[in-house]
Image (spheres, helix red, strand yellow):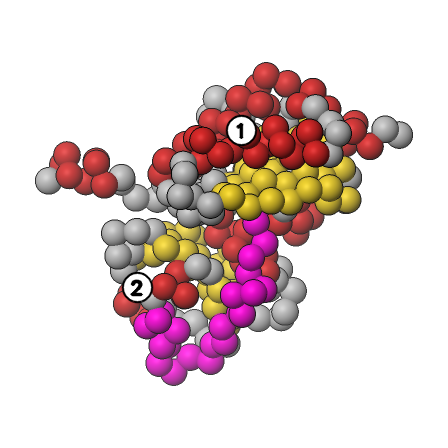
């Protein structure tokens, strides 16, 4: 069978650095990261075009799209989801959406311990969630001040996510047995979305494009100022 018939695209624009990946079946063809010093609106489509050209395939060969729908950068979420939905709609192919916190937890899955994930949310806050070793949700995604994480009643878990590098106090959990996953083992990127489909088969369901919205969790800065 022609490998292009199973071509899949994954993209993540929820964090400061974006990433894309291409795969056919279980074979990863391409994975790349791009920095936020220029916006995702400037980098995402050129990155996708380059990936397709580098692999010798075209957009019309795509059969599935995978995307992170948040939480994360509000602008990044909108750009990534709009791009994914546009490609999926234009090609009439399925779109699968996963939480950016599920993606971050993937690096610590299968180690036999619960996982606490936290990523930077700006405005001196973090997004966090907790999962079992097989990525079943224990605490749903939410937003909080970094110091509030220490009040969680968790024991014997692995810490991972970008926020732990930026907020040193997050690792200070009194009375808890926790260990930090090395940052070198956390840098998975969009390619991890292909593996999430295997880890979370119940979520491997094509999304309703019209009804799929970004997972913001909190109001934007502009909304908060408008209401104040």
Where is residue 93 shown, x and y percent of the image? 65, 23
Q: Which residues are magenta?
A: 168-190
The structure residue drawn at horizontal position 30% and vertical position 51%, both measured from the top left corner, is 122
Does 45 appear in magenta? Answer: no
- Give the quadrant of the N terminus: top right
Q: Which quadrant does the C terminus fall into?
A: top left
Q: Circle 2 sits in a helix, a strand or a loop, which is it?
A: helix
Label count reads 2
Q: Determine if residue 96 is in view.
A: no
- Left or right, 79 with reference to 123: right
187 left or right of 60? left
Q: Indicate which label's residue lies in the foreground, 2 or 1.
A: 1
Give the x, y percent position of residue 114: 53, 67
* Residue ID at (59%, 32%): 48
When asked about the image quadrant of residue 59, the answer is: top right
- Horizontal and vertical percent for residue 85? 53, 25
Magenta stretch: includes residue 180 = yes
Circle 1: element type: helix
Where is mark 1, residue-wise?
45
Relative to 91, 78 lies left or right: left
Residue annotated with mark 2: 146
Quadrant in the rendering for residue 87: top right
Badge 2 crowding class, 10 Å Cα cut-off, few under 14, some 14 to 19, many 20 or more, is: many
202 relative to 165, above or below: above
How many residues crowd around disc 1 within 10 Å: few (fewer than 14), some, or many (20 or more)?
few
State the residue at coordinates (29%, 56%). 125
């Amino acid at each position: 069978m022609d490998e292009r018939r199973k071509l899949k695209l994954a993209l993540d624009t929820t964090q400061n650095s974006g990433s894309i990946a291409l795969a056919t079946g279980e074979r990863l063809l391409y994975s790349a990261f791009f920095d936020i010093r220029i916006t995702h609106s400037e980098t995402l489509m050129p990155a996708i075009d380059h990936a397709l050209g580098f692999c010798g395939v075209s957009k019309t060969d795509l059969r599935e799209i995978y995307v992170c729908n948040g939480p994360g950068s509000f602008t990044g979420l909108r750009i990534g989801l709009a791009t994914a939905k546009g490609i999926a709609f234009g090609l009439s192919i399925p779109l699968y959406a996963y939480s950016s916190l599920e993606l971050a937890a993937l690096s610590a899955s299968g180690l036999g311990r619960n996982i606490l994930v936290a990523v930077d949310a700006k405005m001196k806050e973090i997004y966090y969630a907790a999962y079992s070793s097989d990525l079943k949700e224990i605490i749903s995604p939410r937003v909080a001040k970094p110091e509030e994480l220490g009040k969680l009643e968790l024991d014997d878990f692995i810490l991972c996510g970008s926020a732990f590098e930026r907020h040193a106090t997050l690792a200070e959990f009194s009375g808890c047995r926790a260990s930090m996953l090395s940052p070198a083992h956390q840098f998975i990127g969009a390619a991890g979305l292909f593996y999430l489909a295997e880890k979370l088969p119940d979520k491997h369901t094509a999304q309703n494009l019209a009804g799929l919205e970004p997972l913001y969790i909190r109001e934007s800065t502009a909304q908060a100022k408008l209401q104040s």
